[in-house]
Image (tube, helix red, strand yellow):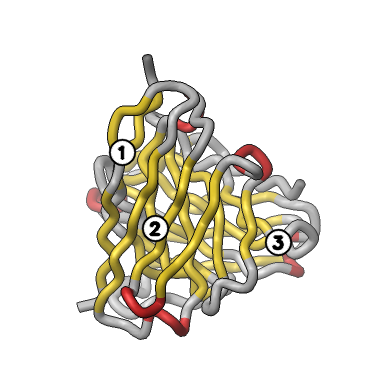
Amino acid sequence: EVQLVESGGGLVQPGGSLRLSCAASGFTFSSYWMSWVRQAPGKGLEWVANIKQDGSEKYYVDSVKGRFTISRDNAKNSLYLQMNSLRAEDTAVYYCARASDAFDIWGQGTMVTVSS
Amino acid sequence: SYVLTQPPSVSVAPGQTARITCGGNNIGSKSVHWYQQKPGQAPVLVVYDDSDRPSGIPERFSGSNSGNTATLTISRVEAGDEADYYCQVWDSSSDQGVFGGGTKLTVL
């Protein structure tokens, strides 16, 4: 079964850091671009970042540039999102998604809450 | 940055046809993807590359794209189609993904 499972969410204070993980299974992880997409409570979807198959290209939404870093470990079939200098507006459910041009496979999401 | 505009809400009676639009500058030159999201669930891809359907998505879901507007059409609407729908493209000028604001489909 093709599956993505996120972990690592939680409550963090403003200015703090958090690392999200996404474990992939059921497909050849190293053959696909991968992305993170987030959704603030009661709001729409927002693309956050994506990474090429070999990690050589990475792109970010302007609001997280310089604060978030996307990475992957193809040997472990895993995708990561290192989030630093977190702000209240980063509070959201974070989804990892397989990016076959469209986002054709999604995880169940992990909640990140930035609050003091 | 590229902007996609969707109507906040669309209402339709069961058995009728729902049309959800997604506006963007010359969107007809881009590939548009559509997602369905029900409360508390992750989004699901329902149409990709303007008009193709992933396996398992009913033929009632179709898409079109031309000029400045892309459209998701849901024929013979059922109560289970009630959800939020999002359009999405890739902005090649900035190498960023872009989502529309979402449309809440209500089945009357």
Q: Disc 1 on helix, strand or loop?
A: strand
Residue A108, image x, y percentages: 27, 53
* Residue that numbered label 3 is attached to: B95
Q: Is residue B24 above or below residue A33?
A: above
Q: CA distance from mark 3 to mark 1?
A: 26 Å
Q: CA distance from mark 1 to mark 2?
A: 12 Å
Image-based side of A66 in relation to B79, left or right: right
Q: Residues within 10 Å of mark 2 (few under 14, many from 20)?
A: many
Task: Mark 3 vs mark 2: tell me if same chain.
Answer: no
B96, above or below B53, in the image? above
Q: Chain of mark 1?
A: A
Q: Dots 1 and 2: beta carbons under 8 Å?
A: no
- Front residue of B40/B70: it is B40
The answer to whether any part of residue B35 appears in the image is yes
The image's mark for residue A111 is: 1
Which element is circle 3 on?
loop
Quadrant showing the C terminus of chain A: top left
Q: Amino acid at mark 2?
A: Cys
Most extreme residue toward the top, as rendered?
A116
Q: Amino acid at mark 3?
A: Asp
Counting residues from the start of the chain, the first of labels 1 and 2 encountered is: 2
Residue appearing at x 51%, y 26% in the figure: A87
Give the residue at x 38% y 19%. Answer: A115
**Residue wearing tag 2:** A96
What is the x, y in percent for residue A63? 63, 38
Q: Residue at x 65, y 44 (%)?
A: A65
Q: Position of residue B24 (x, y in %)?
A: 72, 51
